[in-house]
Amino acid sequence: MKMKLTESQIQDLYAFTRQHFVEHYDLQTELVDHLANDIEMMWKSEPKLSFEEAKNKAFKKFGIFGFMDAIEQKQKAMNKRYRGYLWNEIKKWFEMPQIVATIALYVFFYITFSSKFTAIFSLIFYIIISGWCIYKSTQLNRQFRKRKEFSNKKWMLEELIFKQAGAASLIFMSQLYNVFTIPDKFEINTLFLLLFSLAFTVLTLINYISLEVIPNKAEKLLNETYPEFSL
């Protein structure tokens, strides 16, 4: 007779992963599935082995660091997936019809950085962008907390979508501040202005995509990644 885990034992494995610092439900599910299969395989050859003994033996196979390696690998995989979404959205802004807006933004930056009023323009732009980034980051964090409270689950990709966006805005704002010191640090020439304007155009697009576009597609992306995902 083949021994199978009961529902209460499955829930015990979920609790076990949480006790060992696995916060995200998607990784918990993968580890529970792995542990469950391992335990059931042990019961084939050792049917008298208790659930607790089998669970501990299965866990020991993960090594002295426990689930840490699994957490790190999952984070790398989800970060790679998120960067893929980001890259796909960026590419769209260099295709018709969005490329018209991209060129307009690029020309705006070039004219701004070429002007003798660079510092004034940059200050105004800095205030507007900073305010918008702070507002959107706060809004997304609030949404993430509400989603977690509603579902009582935290998904790794979901956390990236709703919390990683703030990192992009911090990078953008730190670089925007450097505009004030352009005349002091660099010899201004056409090539420099072209490259600097291009860099700021790309940073602006990344910021907009991270804070607006990808979060708006969160449900679609999460359902594609996690078939069991449901709110």
Image: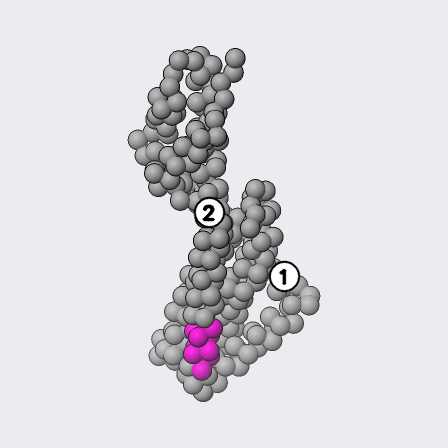
Pointer 2 and pointer 1: residues touching (CB < 8 Å)? Answer: no
From the viewer's side, name the closer residue of 229 and 215. Answer: 229
Query: Residue at (39%, 22%) from the top-left corner?
Result: 51
Query: Residue at (51%, 61%) from the top-left corner?
Result: 210
Q: Closer to us: mark 2 or mark 1?
A: 2
The reply, left or right, for residue 65 in relation to residue 207 is left
Q: Position of residue 101 (x, y in %)?
A: 62, 72
Give the residues in magenta.
Answer: 124-132
> Hey, what amino acid is under mark 1?
Lys
Q: Could you say which quadrant of the image residue 15 lies in?
A: top left
Q: Position of residue 14 (x, y in %)?
A: 42, 36
Q: Which mark is residue 153?
A: 2
Q: Position of residue 180 (x, y in %)?
A: 38, 79
- For label 1, the residue is 92
**Magenta span includes 131:** yes
Mark 2 or mark 1, earlier in chain: 1
Q: Could you say which quadrant of the image residue 47 lies in?
A: top left
